[in-house]
Image (cartoon, rainbow, N blue to C red):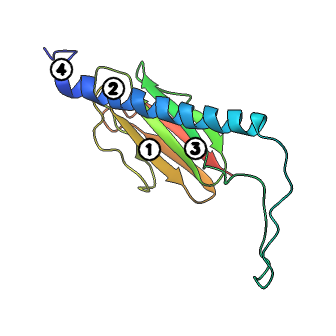
Amino acid sequence: MKNRFDTATVTMRILVVSLIFMVLLVFGFGISCQSQAPASAPPTPSPGLPKGPTSTEPPSTPPQIEVAVEGFAFKPAEITVPVGTTVIWYNNDSVIHTVTARDGSFDSDSLSEGDMFSYTFEERGTFEYYCIPHPYMEGQVVVE
């Protein structure tokens, strides 16, 4: 029987939690800086330099959506996202699963418990996917 707390599993979980914490920390810091910083005028270009587009808004980060693989299902099974979104699947089951596109555009290979797989959707369309060992597990990503 597989030890539920083997080194690789514990290490992977620590990495995933650390990554989530860093994303939340960066996102939270960006909000606190925006709400506390005094309003200022947009920068004025120096004389002799060509004028370019100016923006006071920070560059946006591409959106990310999480899908849990648990209870022999993708949760949520259907999602709609904008172009450029990264979807991250986390295997929370104690058995191996895959995230495999029916059109062959992406495939996670085998995901053990605690593993994750991500894919960035760069084109519009409907992408159906399933789990190879459990073909009744199906999901769909609609990219608008």
Q: Which residue is mark 3?
A: 141
Which secondary structure lies at badge 2?
helix
From mark 2 to mark 1, how far is it between C-alphas?
Answer: 18 Å
Q: Does residue 72 appear in this view?
A: yes
The nearer-to-camera label among 4 and 3 is 4
Give the mark nearer the N terminus: 4 vs 1.
4
Q: What's the amino acid at mark 3?
A: Val
Give the mark nearer the N terminus: 3 vs 1.
1
The nearer-to-camera label among 3 and 1 is 1
Residue 67: image x %, image y %?
51, 32
Q: What's the amino acid at mark 2?
A: Ile
Judged left or right of residue 120, residue 42 is right
Q: Which residue is mark 4?
A: 6
From mark 3 to mark 2, how far is it between C-alphas?
Answer: 28 Å
Q: Is residue 24 above or below residue 117?
A: above
The nearer-to-camera label among 3 and 2 is 2
Query: Which residue is found at the position 69% from the left and 35% from the top?
Result: 31
Q: Which residue is mark 2?
A: 14
